[in-house]
């Protein structure tokens, strides 16, 4: 395997771990993302934490895309 592929896989695993960690941790305590807990825990997970984490990942991806497009348009390749 090439070094670039290994780095890509490692970064994808790290992003997945951060995603699950952000879902599990919060001010109401540690909640495993996919258990069938109480109604309140389920509501906190799917109505508060999941949209926040998805929005954070989407914002990061769009910022990366904007930076890439700006580099391509201005011909200042890194």
Image: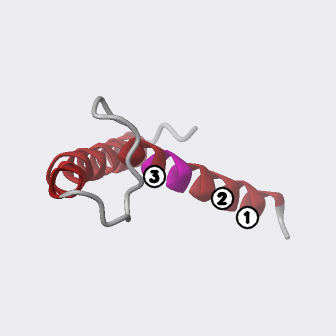
- Residue 74 placement: quadrant: top left
Highlighted magenta segment, given as a residue range: 15-19
Q: Compare residues 68 and 12 and report the one nearer the observer.
A: 12
Eyeballing the image, is 75 above or below 17? above
Q: Earlier in the sequence, mark 3 or mark 2?
A: 2
Helix, strand or loop at label 3? It is helix
Q: Is residue 45 visible?
A: yes
Eyeballing the image, is 78 above or below 13? above
Q: Earlier in the sequence, mark 3 or mark 1?
A: 1
**Residue sticking out furthest to the right:** 1
> Residue at (66%, 58%) from the top-left corner?
8
**Residue sticking out furthest to the bottom:** 1
Residue hosting label 2:
8
The reply to whether callout 3 and callout 1 are in contact (CB within 8 Å) is no
> Are there few (<14), some (14-19), or many (20+) residues within 10 Å of tag 3?
some
Residue hosting label 3:
20
């Amino acid at each position: 395997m090439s070094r670039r592929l290994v780095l890509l896989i490692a970064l994808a695993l790290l992003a997945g771990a951060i995603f699950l960690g952000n879902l599990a941790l919060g001010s109401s305590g540690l909640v495993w993302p996919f258990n069938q807990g109480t109604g309140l825990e389920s509501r906190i997970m799917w109505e508060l934490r999941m949209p926040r984490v998805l929005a954070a990942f989407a914002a990061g991806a769009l910022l990366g895309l904007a930076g890439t497009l700006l580099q391509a348009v201005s011909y200042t390749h890194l």
